[in-house]
Amino acid sequence: MNFKGTAKRLEDLDLPRIGASIGVGEDELHAFMDTETRGTGFDDQGRPRILFEPHVFYRCLPAAKRAAAVKQGLACKSWGQIKYGKESAQYGRLEQALKIDETAALKACSWGLGQVLGENHIAAGYETVQEMVKAMMEDEEHHLEAIVNFIVENKIDDDMRRLAALKRPTTPDDCRTIVRVYNGAGYEKNDYHTKFAANHNKWRKIKDTPYQPELEQPAVKEPEKPVATPEPEKPAVLPPSEKKQEPDLPAPPPPDIEPVDPVKPAAPGGFFVALAKAFSRLVNRSA
């Protein structure tokens, strides 16, 4: 790995936008960045700024590999046993450590704007340390998101909001909980709480970038235009002279119907004659 990606710097709205996600402003995030890396996440070669931590390398290594790392001066049991050295020497140490164990070496470095330790990749929002490092190579926005994810995961976002709400100058005591969780129990040796307070006060005096989250609307996707359905072709209308002449068909023969005999009309008076005869027969039977 050459650790070079696009190395995109923060945009003006990244700080207030990401800070707003946990209810803080630019000043609180600037304090983190200035305390950890003087506000820049990439070195002069476009690589994420790192600090190789020998004691972290030791604890992340499998036991079978520790002796080799100790022998090369890359690992130690306790913090401070091996000096950090110059910033320019950090990638050289990392390259040596990678030859022993890649994952342990990446976990042993603090990365980017917030110097998030690779060992804390889960808290920073990444399944693997390799994924975190690749993101750090691309954009300082990811550095800032990793800081915020770590803050929330370690439950110091309330402390950050308390800083944001202060109406008086920030004191080192206001920052102790934050830097103790973020930098470890030895924070006082490096005076992190004092540096954090000073950086916070500095940025509180600087006007923030105007930011209105309600104006950040997602781009509206234009509806797709319906595809026109082609109309069926109309049959060509032929002029009368070109129309096909259908031959005249003969008329169908009439259906075979049996003739019906006409009903003969009854003879005049026939009804009364029949009635008289029937009455006569009835009288005779009675006699």
Image: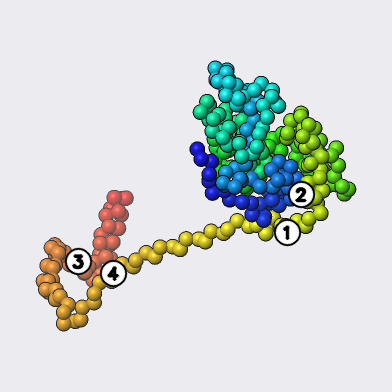
| Residue on which the image places disc 3 | 263
| Disc 1 to disc 4, C-alpha distance | 61 Å
**Where's residue 188, x and y in %?**
80, 32
| Residue on which the image places disc 2 | 27
Residue at 52% x, 25% y: name it.
100
The secondary structure type at the circle numbered 3 is loop
- Residue 282's disc is none
The secondary structure type at the circle numbered 2 is helix
Mark 3 or mark 2, which is nearer the start of the sequence? Answer: 2
Res. 22 image quadrant: top right
**Where's residue 238, x and y in %?**
21, 78
| Residue 63 horizontal side relative to residue 211, left or right | left
The secondary structure type at the circle numbered 1 is loop
Q: Is residue 191 visible?
A: yes
Q: Counting other residues with Cα less than 10 Å from the Cα at mark 2, is it few (<14), some (14-19), or many (20 or more)?
A: many
Mark 1 or mark 2, which is nearer the start of the sequence? Answer: 2
- Residue 233's disc is 4
Mark 1 or 3: the one toward you? 1
Residue 122, compared with residue 64, is above or below; it is below
Residue type, mark 3 in image: Val
Q: Is residue 127 visible?
A: no
Q: Counting other residues with Cα less than 10 Å from the Cα at mark 3, is it few (<14), some (14-19), or many (20 or more)?
A: few
Discs 1, 4 touching: Cβ within 8 Å: no
| Disc 1 to disc 3, C-alpha distance | 112 Å
Q: Counting other residues with Cα less than 10 Å from the Cα at mark 4, is it few (<14), some (14-19), or many (20 or more)?
A: few
Mark 4 or 3: the one toward you? 4
| Residue on which the image places disc 1 | 210
The secondary structure type at the circle numbered 4 is loop
Mark 3 or mark 1, which is nearer the start of the sequence? Answer: 1
Judge by depth and name the residue closer to the eye, 246 or 124.
Answer: 124
